[in-house]
Amino acid sequence: MKLLKTIARILVCLLPFFLALLLQFLISFGGIFAGIMLSALKDPGLLKGEELYSTIYTLASDSQFLAGISALYAVLAALLLGFWYWKRFVPKKRPRRPVSSIINPSMFFGLVFLMLGMQYITTYIVMITAAVNPSWYDIYEELLKSIGFGDVTLLLALYSVLIAPVSEELIFRGVTLKYAVKSMPLAAANIFQAALFGIFHGNVVQGVYAFVVGLFCGYVCLKGGSIYLSILFHMMFNLWGTFAPSFLSYTGDSVLIHAVIFAGAACSAAFGIFLYQRGAAGRKKKRIS
């Protein structure tokens, strides 16, 4: 009986993940169908034979279309999972906490240093993963190009920096992690949600570094006692990843320089954790919101 209860709890933890996948599929399918119908209104011949396949391929290759579909999915997922999170986990009769009881300057700058360190650490994770199997990186690179990261548009920027962090945090550090901490030890719950976060990205390179980033997002949420903090960290991370100038990345072959950069990144992340923990411990109230 105890085993069955444990299995049931784990299955509940998986529900947000599968719900997000289903929603993503439905939005993608619906978007392509709507695109085909709109194209057919202009030229009914596009619904025939090879023309139909060509139309589907054109839509699936359009970076603006893909960014729009991604943004629409993320907004709907944020609304759905946000309602689930609010309904199930947010206390209804407690007064709202002031901002100062959620975050303080030490925690904010801790997140900044942690984000900077993790940016460079994940770069090396990507490099190592690509070295293991170059085809994995090719798939990852094509994905970035297809959605338009070679030429960032306003829609893509809004999706990457604002919409996706809210959506993904509600799915993984929100509902999933909340259920997971009730079903398994804290460390296992964090690893569990980070693993799902990695799998959700759908390719090896993104999956590996998303797992690592997911661990730290989980840490930020759990240690800080608020999902707002992991959303902020995620936004910072994506903001840097989307807009950081190329000269801040070293692409040379010097092992020494790479070692220095990695050491600096590790120190930055460690200092960020120190500041964040000190700030979190210094707040008057600490409770999950």
Image (cartoon, rainbow, N blue to C red):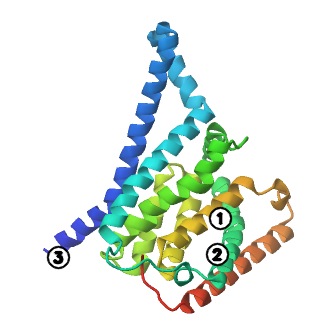
Q: Which quadrant holds the C terminus? A: bottom left
Residue 175 image-quadrant placement: bottom left
From the viewer's side, name the closer residue of 232 and 254: 232
From the viewer's side, name the closer residue of 79 and 4: 79
Residue 205 image-quadrant placement: bottom right
Q: CA distance from mark 1 to mark 2?
A: 8 Å
Q: Earlier in the sequence, mark 1 or mark 2?
A: 2
Residue pointed to by mark 2: 111
Q: Which mark is residue 2?
A: 3
Q: Earlier in the sequence, mark 1 or mark 3?
A: 3
- Binning the other alpha carbons within 10 Å of mark 1 as few (below 14), some (14 to 19) or many (20 upward) gives some
- The reply to whether residue 79 is visible in this rendering is yes
Q: Residue at 69% x, 57% y: name it.
A: 241
Asked if residue 108 lies left or right of residue 43, the reply is: right
In the picture shown, does residue 34 fall above or below 133?
A: above
Kind of residue at badge 2: Leu
Asked if residue 65 lies left or right of residue 15, the reply is: right
From the top left corner, tell me how far across and down residue 281 is, in percent. Answer: 55, 91
Residue pointed to by mark 1: 236
User: What secondary structure is found at the residue carrying circle 1?
Assistant: helix
Q: Residue at 72% x, 66% y: name it.
A: 120
